[in-house]
Structures are given as C-alpha cells and as structure tokens.
Image (cartoon, rainbow, N blue to C red):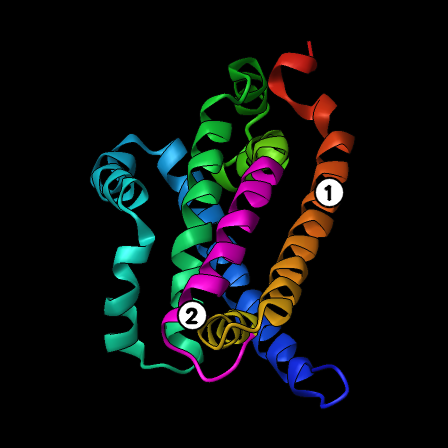
C-alpha cells in the first residue's frame, strides 16, 4: 500500500478536504458567533436554525450534499464544514455572553467604538471558548472526512477504508483508522496545549 504510493494520494485528498472544510467553519463560525452573542435580534433570527441543524445528525445530510455538490471535493468540504462549524459558533456565542460587563463599561466610558470594543475586549475574552470550540469542531471535522469519503468519493482515507472493508482487507482498514485517530489525537493535544496557555483569560479566572 505504501510502496505503491496510492495511500499518499489518499492522504493528500483527505488533507485538502479537511483544511478547506475546517478553515471555512472557522471563517463562518467565529464572526457569526460574535454577532449572535452580541446582538439579540441576530441571535433571535438564527438561533432556531442553528439549534435545529446542530441537533440533527449530519450524516442524514450527506445525500443532499452529494446531490448539490457532486462526488468531488465540494460535497466533502460541505460535510466537514457542517460538522465543525456549530461547535465553534456555539462556543463563540457563549464566550461573548460571558464577557465581563465591567470591562465593557470601562471601555465605553473611555469612548471606545463598537469596533474597538470587539478588538480589545470582546474577542480577547472569547479566546478560551474559541479554542475549546476549535478542539470540539476538530473531532467533528475528522468524522466528516470519513463519512463523506465512505459515502461518495474516488479517493481519500475514508474511501480507502470503505474499499478495504468491502474486500475484507482488515490491515488496510486498520491503517486508515489509525491514521485518522493519530491525526485527531495530535491536533487535539496541540489545541489543548494552546488552550491551557490561555486558561487565565477565562472570565472566572481573571478576577
């Protein structure tokens, strides 16, 4: 498997899908979470949809993603995005809502604009919750890779696991599982280490 080089292409494909899907989930989840946490009207509009999508099993949406985006990169990126974005978004909402109101009052007293308030008070205060959301979203993103590629793909680690399983090649299945698990553990521990460095930024720990 390694000598023939096929697995390297699978790793490359899965890596590209993961990076795109996870990056999009951050680009959408972070600003949307800040807006929903700060503005009640925006939260009232989007919160029911977020709750409904977060509660629904994302695997049920896989056929729809394939119909919309085909079996190429698009459908897998969409599946990974849907898996990772909600933990990030919800944690950001929680982070914004737990910002120390005294800090906000002081910033307002010094004439800080909304933009300055977000940059100097709100966002720094949400960093611990953001990192926790990134860590949770990471696990969902890795699940999305496997599910999406097992359902409709022509390459990738999930596709390799699916093909190997259907032909009873246990060793290849285990290689794929170990690779995904190893990546998950490595990235999770890296985020956990960063999270510990920002632990003192949590509102309860700054008093």
Where disc 1 sits, the SS reads helix
Q: Position of residue 85 (x, y in %)?
A: 44, 50
Residue behind mark 1:
189
Q: CA distance from mark 1 to mark 2?
A: 26 Å
Please report the residue visible at 75 percent of the width from the left and 30 percent of the height from the top.
196
User: Where on the picture, by quarter, is residue 77?
Assistant: bottom left
Extreme-front residue of the structure: 168
Few, some or many residues within 10 Å of mark 1 (<14, 14–19, 20+) = few
Q: Position of residue 189 (x, y in %)?
A: 73, 42
Which residue is more in the foreground, 78 or 5? Answer: 5
- Residue 150's tag is 2
- Residue 115's tag is none
Q: Position of residue 31 (x, y in %)?
A: 46, 48
Which residue is more in the foreground, 184 or 168? Answer: 168
Q: Is residue 192 above or below residue 154?
A: above
Tell whether 96 sits left or right of 71.
right
Main SS of the magenta part reads helix
Please report the residue visible at 23 percent of the width from the left and 76 percent of the height from the top.
67
Magenta region: 130-156
Q: Is residue 63 magenta?
A: no
Q: Position of residue 3 (x, y in %)?
A: 77, 87
Tell whether 172 sits left or right of 31.
right
Please report the residue visible at 48 percent of the width from the left and 50 percent of the height from the top.
140
Q: Is residue 29 above or below residue 166?
A: above
Which residue is more in the foreground, 142 or 165? Answer: 165
Where disc 2 sits, the SS reads helix
Q: Is residue 143 magenta?
A: yes
């Amino acid at each position: 498997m390694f000598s023939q080089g096929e697995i390297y292409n699978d790793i490359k494909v899965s890596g590209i899908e993961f990076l795109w899907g996870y990056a999009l989930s951050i680009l959408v989840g972070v600003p949307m979470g800040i807006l929903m946490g700060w503005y009640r009207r925006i939260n009232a509009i989007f919160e029911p949809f977020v709750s409904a999508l977060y509660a629904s099993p994302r695997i049920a949406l896989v056929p729809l993603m394939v119909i919309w985006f085909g079996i190429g990169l698009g459908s897998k990126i969409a599946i990974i995005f849907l898996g990772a974005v909600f933990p990030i978004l919800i944690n950001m909402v929680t982070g914004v809502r737990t910002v120390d109101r005294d800090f906000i009052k002081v910033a307002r007293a010094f004439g800080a604009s909304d933009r300055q308030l977000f940059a100097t008070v709100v966002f720094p205060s949400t960093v611990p919750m953001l990192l926790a959301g990134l860590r949770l979203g990471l696990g969902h993103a890795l699940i999305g890779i496997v599910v999406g590629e097992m359902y409709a793909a022509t390459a990738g680690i999930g596709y390799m696991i699916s093909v190997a399983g259907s032909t009873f090649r246990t060793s290849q299945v285990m290689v794929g599982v170990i690779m995904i698990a190893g990546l998950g553990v490595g990235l999770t521990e890296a985020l956990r280490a960063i999270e510990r460095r920002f632990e003192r930024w949590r509102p309860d720990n700054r008093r």
